[in-house]
Every structure is written in structure tokens, then in C-alpha cells.
Image (tube, helix red, strand yellow):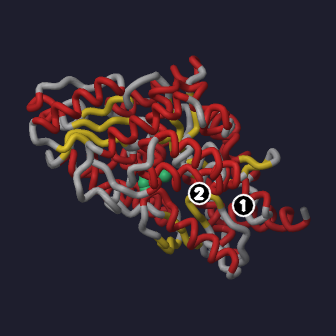
Amino acid sequence: MAHIRALSTAVAIGGLVALGSAPAAAQTAEVLHYWTSGGEARAVAALQQEFEAAGGTWIDSPVAGGGGDAQATVLRARVLAGDPPTAVQIKGPNIQDWAAEGALANLDEVAAAEGWDEILPPLLRDIVTYEGHYVAVPVNIHRVNWLWVNPALLEQAGVAVPTTWDEFNAAADALLAAGITPLAHGGQPWQDATVFETVVLGLGGADFYRQALVDLDPDALTSDTMIAVFEQMRRLSGYVDPNFPGREWNLATRMVMNGEAAMQIMGDWAKGEFAAAELQPGSDYLCVPTPGAAGYILNSDSFAFFKVEGEDRIAGQRLLASLILGTDFQETFNLFKGSIPARNDVPPDAFDACAVRSMDDLAQAVAADSLVPSMAHEIAIGRAARGAFLDVVTEHFNSDMTAEEAVERLVEEVELAQ
Ligand code: BGC
């Protein structure tokens, strides 16, 4: 508690300096992130520019590797070595875990000054607060369950955009017969899990999704629906090209752009890649929800600030935290990133059709109770249980394991991980 009070005082001093009162103190932030693809790099560069324009010194610490698993290892090693970064891009239960360890700075003063209680939707507020205190700041809302489509290839094969998994399979078979790779995919565990959770939602609906991927209910994990999910995953493993193992997600997106594959299942960070290549939704590419039951799989990126020493670093943390939810910045950043704003009052006017659809579908999902947190992107459950899903889903995708064997393995591994 005394520590938190001392930190708040230091943060308040940093804030005054940030507002321009003399003497000018340095404001430094070392930012650990994994935004290294074309669209991601544009988005993080916008944050860096905003920070530097406000007088901050930015030290960039990128750790390549989509989904952030490589970064998570680096972060833990740095904290254990007593050298935490000043700011880090983390999310979901990871924020709560670090806060429970007492590692995160309290952001209540910045939050009060910037009115976060009023501008943040409750679903994000829950993610970034711990025991009633702000310990992180959300920067966006990403939707995971998107299908990215090359319309010219679908037309060439004479198929319509699929809206159910049966339609998807029929379209994919027709694409294969026309000599076109149906699915662009990167064989990495988090990407396999991304596809898997969209199938869980599509075949099972939101209630089943919650039972299986949030509550980890053994009956749901071994149900006929889960067997059908793994059978669909087996179908999908036949629709990818032979070079899929290990491929980064953005290279898979590029395959859709270049006409090397017809579709990709990926969150809307993929839209950041289409945007960086100056392609237009509706004509150059299509964004549609993944097949099956309606719903919205939520992912949201946040920045958390580790407790650090040094006035310049504490001032840098406060400055960065206060800039992230600025209205103009939210627009610029999210246009590059492919996501939609974290605050609920940014006008949709500047956003493209995919973002507007994301905003509308999010509101509808909240009303219909079909908003679900992403398992693959670490919003639903902690790292250990998520790891159990990634292991089994990836092993099944890359072997001849039956769906029945997969659910047995899954329920065992999930139980061990709890
Ligand atoms: C993150 C995104 C990121 C994507 C690919 C997701 O888990 O939330 O911000 O673009 O992984 O790295």
C-alpha cells in the first residue's frame, strides 16, 4: 500500500511535468510488444509518434512472433531478472496474474484524469482492473471470428461465400477441384487454436462455447458437438497447402491477397495487412463472420506498466497511459491495426465496412448474449489451460488422431492444467 502511494505521488509529479510545468523532466518508455507485421508495425509506429510528439523518449523492444507467445517468455525472464520493461502489451487473465503478483503499477490517477470509467465499455473495464484498481489500459477491440475472402477466386470456382460449415466444405471441395488452395493457414499452435475456436462457436453456438472454452466443463469437452468440431478441423487440415507448417499469419494473409489461396480464418489484425497494401474491402477482399452460429469472439490488446524505478520512467508510463485512449489516437491506431476503438464514443465515420460491421455485430452480440472471450488470444482462460488446448488441437491437426481420441486427450490435459 505504501508502495502504491509512493508510486502515485511520483506519477502525479510526472504528470505535471508532462503538462509542461518546469522543470522539464525526461519521460521515457521502453515498450515490449510483438507487433512486427506490416499493419502491426504501422499501428505501433503511430503510438511511438504520438508519444514522441508529447515529448517522450521511446525505446522499442519488439519480439517477433504472432500471438505473443515468444514475447510472454521474454517478459517472464525479464521480470525474474529484476529488469521489467516500463510498458508491455499484454491482455486478459495475464493482466490479472501479474497484478496478483504485485508487479503492476496502479493507474487510478490517470484513469480518473482521463475519465476511463465513462469511456470504457464494462467488458473492457473488467479486463484492465484488478480488485477495483486500473492496472492496464486497453487500446482496441479485435474480433477473432472473421473469414477473409478473395472474391475473384470464389467466382473462378463458381462458389458463394459460405455461411455454414457444410457450405464451407462444399465450397472448399469446389475450389480444390478448380486447382485453388481453399484455406491459407499458418501451422502454429495459436493459429490452429484461432481456427478451432471459430469452429466451436460456429457448430456449438455461444452457450456451448462458454461451457467448453471458458468453464472448461468436461461434459462439453467430450460432447458429440466437440467431436464434430474436431471432425471439422480434420476437414480443414485437408484444405491447406503443403507449406503451411510454421508459416506466420501475415504470410497466410498475403496468400489471399495474391490469389494463392481463397480464404483465411483470422482475427481482424489481418485487415491491417490488407489496409497496409491499400486494398479495399468489398472489392479487393471480403470480410465476413466465420461460418455457423452468430456471435462475436472478443480479443482486446492492452498495455500494462510494471513497477519500475526512476522518475523519467514513471513519468513516461503516465504519459503513455494517458495518450492511448485519446479520441484521435484511437481512430488513427485502430485504422492501421484493423481493430475498432476501445472507447465507446469514437464516431464510426472514418472506419471501413469491416470495422463498421465489427461495431454493429459487437452491439448485437452484447444484446443477444453471444459475445464470447477468445481462448486462443488469452482473454477467456489463463496460459496453462490455454496451453492444453493448443497442444491437443495442434497435435490433432498434424496427425491422424481421431476426433474421439482428441476429446479424450483434451479433457485430460485441461484437467491437469487447472
Ligand atoms: C493480438 C494482436 C496481434 C495478433 C498477431 C493477437 O493475439 O491481439 O494484436 O496482431 O495476435 O500477432
Dot 2, crowdedness within 10 Å: few (<14), some or many (≥20)?
A: many
Residue 329, horizontal then vertical, whole percent: 47, 48
The image quadrant that residue 107 belongs to is bottom right
Does the rendering let one see residue 331? no
Return the x and y of residue 283 as percentages of the image width and height.
18, 32
* In this picture, residue 116 sits left or right of residue 209: right
Label 2 sits on what residue type?
A: Ile
Q: Nearer the viewer, residue 126 or 162?
A: 162
Q: Residue furthest top?
A: 368
SS category of the residue bearing label 1: helix
Whether residue 365 is situated above or below residue 34 in the rendered picture: above
- Residue at image x 62%, y 63%? 18
Q: Name the residue type under label 1.
A: Trp
Residue with the mark numbered 2: 90
* Label 1 sits on residue: 98
Q: Quadrant of residue 44?
A: bottom left
Disc 1 to disc 2: CB gap under 8 Å = yes
Seen at 69% across and 67% down, the residue is 306
**Residue at (68, 54) in percent of width and height:** 417
Q: If the image is split into quadrants, where does the N terminus sit?
A: bottom right
Q: Nearer the viewer, residue 345 or 211?
A: 211
Picture coordinates of residue 33, whole percent (x, y)? 50, 64
Q: Position of residue 223 (x, y in %)?
A: 58, 30
Q: For this view, does 271 lie left or right of residue 226? A: left
Left or right: where 184 falls relative to 100: left
Frontmost residue, 240 versus 372: 240
How crowded pointer 1 is (Cα within 10 Å; few <14, some 14-19, many 20+) is rated as some
SS under mark 2 = strand
